[in-house]
Amino acid sequence: MLVAKLIGSVWSTRKADSMKGLKLMLVELVGGSRAGERMMVVDTIGAGIGDRVIVSTGSSARKMLDDDNIPVDAVIVGIIDEDCELPSFGEVCESD
């Protein structure tokens, strides 16, 4: 899973029939070696622009859509509520 910030909406007037009704969004990855990388994701939980989100990729993303035949490889699976810096591996995130 990846941590990202939701930075915009993606509008597509024509897309595969299996993708009709899916909300496409643009995220920017936060932290790690891929920080700053942007990717298109499907939002199934109603996140808003500016939210920090958890993104699932690959076959796990398609499972969120209950259909392995949908051509999607990234889905928002959570909104991060806690406003703290992501800890390094093995550390604990402490909030105020």
Image (spheres, rainbow, N blue to C red):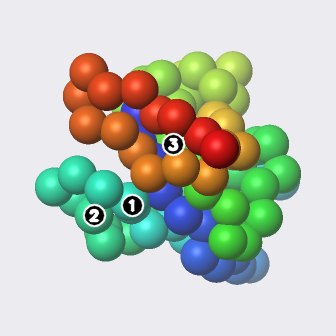
Q: Secondary structure at mark 3?
A: strand
- Residue nearer the viewer, 9 or 70: 9
Q: Amino acid at mark 3?
A: Val
Q: Residue beneath label 3, please? A: 55
**The N terminus sits in image quarter:** top left
Q: Is residue 40 left or right of residue 46?
A: left
Q: How far from the left and from the top, in percent, is residue 58?
A: 39, 33
- Does the image show residue 10? no
Q: Residue at x 80, y 42 (%)?
A: 45
- Does the image show residue 84? yes
Lower sequence index among marks 3 and 2: 2
**The C terminus sits in image quarter:** top right
From the viewer's perspective, is residue 2 above or below residue 48?
above
From the viewer's perspective, is residue 17 above or below residue 57?
below
Quadrant in which residue 54 is drawn: top right
Q: Residue at x 28, y 63 (%)?
A: 35
Q: Is residue 88 left or right of residue 22?
A: left
Question: Neighbour class for label 2 at 10 Å: few (<14), some, many (≥20)?
Answer: few
Q: How far from the left and from the top, in percent, is residue 30?
A: 38, 59
- Residue nearer the viewer, 66 or 81: 81
- Residue nearer the viewer, 54 or 68: 54
The answer to whether the residue labelled 1 contacts the one labelled 2, judged by CB atoms less than 8 Å apart, is: yes
Q: Amino acid at mark 2?
A: Ala
Label 1 and label 3: CA atoms lie apart by: 9 Å
Q: Which mark is residue 35?
A: 2
Q: Residue beneath label 1, please? A: 29
Q: Secondary structure at mark 1?
A: strand
Label 3 and label 2: CA atoms lie apart by: 14 Å
Q: Secondary structure at mark 2?
A: loop
